[in-house]
Image (cartoon, rainbow, N blue to C red):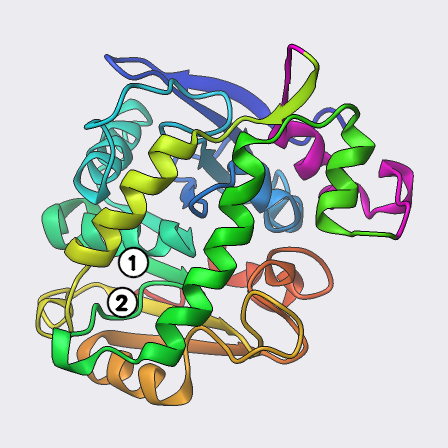
Amino acid sequence: MERTLWTTGSVLGEVRLAFGRVGEGAEPVLALHGITAQHRAFNSSARLLGPAANGMVALDLRGRGNSDKPSSGSYGLARHSEDAVRTLDSLEIERGVLVGHSMGAFVALNTALSYPERVAALVLLDGGWPRPEEEEVNEEESAAIEEGLARAFRRLDMVFETPEDYLDFWFPGQGLTFEDLPPDLADYYRYDLGEVEGGYQPKASHEAAEEDTESFSSESPTVAQMGNIECPVALVRAAEGFFPDSKPLISDETRDVMAEALNLRSETLLQGANHYSMLFEPFAGRWAGLLSSDWWRG
C-alpha cells in the first residue's frame, strides 16, 4: 500500500484520538469504524475519494488503534459522540457528514441525536438498526450478532507469534502472507497489530469493546428516537452477515422500519458482500461516491 495514502494526526485532549486523513479539503467526511477495528477499515473508500475531493478524516475511536485507551467507565455511545464532535471542532467543521460502519453507525446516529446542529448527513454502513423494545427482541438475530462479535473479541486477548499467524486466525488453513492480500486489506491487518512481549496483539482494548457492546445494546436509538433525526441519511447494507452465506444484519423488514423513521435519501444493497468485505474492493466502489457527492443537499 502507498505510504502516502493517510496523513496521520491527533485530536488532543484528556483522551488523545489518533486519525488518518486523506485530502486537504475544508470539509472532509468524518469516518467512524466498527467495534474492534480502526481507521484503516476505510482504506478503500479513502483511496477512491482521492485528493481532489474534500477527503476523509477517519478516527481511531478511543480504545482502538493508536488512540488512548483509558480505563473502564470511559466508553459508550455518549463518549464516542463527544469525541466525534471534538474532532469536528478540531477540524473547524460546523456541520459535518458522518459515515459509520457497524458500531460506528450507532455512534453516528447518536451524534445526530445529541448534537443535531453539528451533523449535516449520515452514511450508515451495515449498522444503526433500531434498538428493539424488550418484547420485540428477535432471538435468532441476537444470537447471530453475538456469534459474530464473539469471534472478533476472541482475538483481542491473543498474542500472535508473527503477523502471518494473525492472518491465519482470519483465514484459517490457507497459509496466506500479506503479499497474497489486496494492498488495502493487508495494510488494515498490519495496522491492527501492535508489538508486545512474545509477538503481536491487536491494538483494540477488550475492555473497551465489552463496555461499548453494553452501551449500544441498551442506549442506541429506538425507532421512536430515530424519528427525531432530521438530517438526510444514506443506508448501505451487505447482503450477508458476519460470515459468507449468513443472513444480513439488516433484514428487509428492519430496513423498512428504518426507512419509515429516518429521512432516507439513498439506499444500496451490496449483493455478494458480507459485513466485513463491504468495506473493501470491489464493493467499496459501489458506495464510496456517497462520500463526495451532494446527494444529501436540497
Q: Is residue 40 above or below residue 144?
A: above
Give percent across and percent down for residue 251: 41, 83
Q: Quadrant of residue 11?
A: top left
For image coordinates 20% across by 52% down, the residue present is 110
Tell me which numbered mark, 1 or 2, is placed earlier along the sequence: 1
For image coordinates 67% across by 72% down, the residue present is 244
**On the rendered structure, is 115 left or right of 100?**
left
Give percent across and percent down for residue 85: 22, 35
Q: Is residue 76 above or below residue 173?
A: above
| Mark 2: secondary structure | strand
Name the foreground residue: 287 vs 276: 276
**Which amino acid is tagged 1?**
Ala
| C-alpha span from label 1 to label 2 | 5 Å
Name the foreground residue: 249 vs 84: 249
**On the rendered structure, is 281 left or right of 178?**
left
Q: Which mark is residue 121?
A: 1
Tell me, yes or no, whether the two marked residues, 1 and 2, touch with CB atoms within 8 Å.
yes
Q: Judge whether residue 177 is colored magenta.
A: yes
Name the foreground residue: 136 vs 59: 136
Name the foreground residue: 204 vs 100: 204
Q: Judge whether residue 96 is colored magenta.
A: no
Residue receiving disc 2? 232
Assign the C terminus to one quadrant of the image: bottom left
Q: Is residue 53 above or below residue 164?
A: below
Q: Can residue 293 be seen here?
A: no
Magenta residues span: 174-197
Give percent across and percent down for residue 199: 71, 18
**Which amino acid is tagged 2?**
Pro
